Image (cartoon, rainbow, N blue to C red):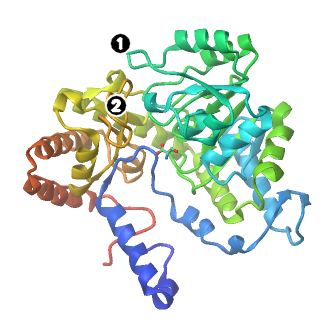
Amino acid sequence: MHEPAIARLRAQDPDIAGLVEAEARRQFEKLRLIASENYVSPAVLEATGSVLTNKYSEGYAGRRYYEGQQNIDPIELLAVDRAKQVFGVEHANVQSYSGSPANLAVYLAFLEPGDTVMGMSLPMGGHLTHGWSVSATGRWFRPVRYGVREDTGRIDMDQVRDLARAERPKLIWCGGTAVPRTIDFPAFAEIAREVGAVLAADIAHIAGLIAGGAHPSPVGCADVITTTTHKTLRGPRGAMIMSTAEHAKAVDKAVFPGLQGGPHNHTTAAIAVALGEAARPEFAEYARRVVANAKALAAALAERGFDLVSGGTDNHLILIDLTGKGVPGKPAAQALDRAGIELNYNTVPFDPRTPFDPSGLRLGTAAITTRGLTEEAMPQIAAWIDEVVQATAKEDEAVLARVAGEVRELMAGYPMPGWAPAP
Ligand code: DSN
């Protein structure tokens, strides 16, 4: 049973309703370890599915290009105020459609085409929009890229400093999509100041941990901070850009009218709801548990001989190099999915394989922590991953089917926000 209910959808469009129900059941039964995913609350779902989707609101509160903003303006102002409070920032823009558009707005606010941008290389753990070659950001700007040290798997701050001094980027990105260790925001800030670059922190993965006090904040270090709202922050699919007051105008102009038309007001309301949840003491406890679970899972995997990039984790994310297990990331991820364990194949630093068939697996604990799993469950999860990876090498489908049943049985004991099996 979906919550909020989808009875009218079922009556009017059983095809779509059936697929929504099937997806909900899939999310209920599986061990969801994709590091960028979560389960939102029913309140966030209700806001996302509200009549606010009917309204156009180009502009900002008090300065719109459409009439009828009596309720939209206070909703957006609430979202902005809550973002300012939760993250302790001077300015927040909550209109970006998602993470990539938010990052593009940073380029529009601070750079001209052809300017130099420095970001973490994608296969090392960065993001497409930090200047990777296939992204507009790597084609329209001049990218220079840093990575991690081969001996530690941690960001090579000497390389960051040397490259910045040599290339004088106008913009430096820190943050990424496969970074298992704490980002040293003060060190990045020192380098950016020295070379006169704008420092942008992309905290999409760790925003919830920062909000909950389980990761240091880039506030006071970064000039501009971007984040999606749907990963550890546990809100709807959307994004925010935060900055000092000095850059507020440039950021807002870049989002609208620079890149976008009307904001998605239903998403804005859901972001406000999620930020309200993130301000509660329970959320700090949630963030602490996400990290505790990731550390426990990393330790259990290491005990079973898995090679973890950087040797472990400080946050919600674990990156496994499967080379030593003799199985590439893609077949392992596909087998794990058949066994009820959902994660993604991923490049590892210095990967000799291709991004579409890489050596690694990326996993995270944000979603399973929302379901209520604790550190005690992590050795069992590591054991299942180990069994399935071994079964992949032997093409043993029977093991996968057995594990899928055991996973289903475990997850049946942990309620899912937004859906429950019919009584
Ligand atoms: N898709 C996001 C992630 O999985 O990390 C990045 O854009």
Q: Upstream in the sequence, badge 1 or badge 2?
A: 1
Q: Position of residue 319 (x, y in %)?
A: 35, 33
The answer to whether residue 373 is above or below residue 59 is: above
Determine the residue positioned at 72% across, 37% down.
106
Element marked by disc 2: helix
In front: 263, or 275? Answer: 263
Q: Mark 2 points at which residue?
A: 295
Q: How crowded is mark 2: few (under 14 residues within 10 Å), some or many (20 or more)?
A: many
Can I make out residue 44 in this image?
yes
Determine the residue positioned at 85% across, 57% down.
59
On screen, residue 226 versus residue 297, left or right, reads: right
In front: 103, or 402? Answer: 103
Counting the numbered discs, the total is: 2
Q: What residue type is labelled 2?
A: Lys
In front: 212, or 180? Answer: 180
Determine the residue positioned at 69% across, 20% down.
169
Determine the residue positioned at 70% across, 62% down.
264
Q: Kindly report which numbered mark, 1 or 2, lies closer to the viewer in this rendering.
A: 1
The answer to whether residue 310 is above or below residue 7 is: above
Q: In which quarter of the image is residue 117?
A: top right
In front: 213, or 354? Answer: 354
Q: Name the residue under label 1.
A: 151
On screen, residue 70 versus residue 133, left or right, reads: right
Cα–Cα gap, marks 1 and 2: 21 Å
Element marked by disc 1: loop
Point out which mark residue 114 bears.
none
Q: Position of residue 213 (x, y in %)?
A: 55, 33
- Residue that sits furthest to the bottom in the current view: 11
On screen, residue 294 versus residue 256, left or right, reads: left
Q: Which amino acid does label 1 sit on?
A: Asp
Quadrant of the rendering where the N terminus is positioned = bottom left
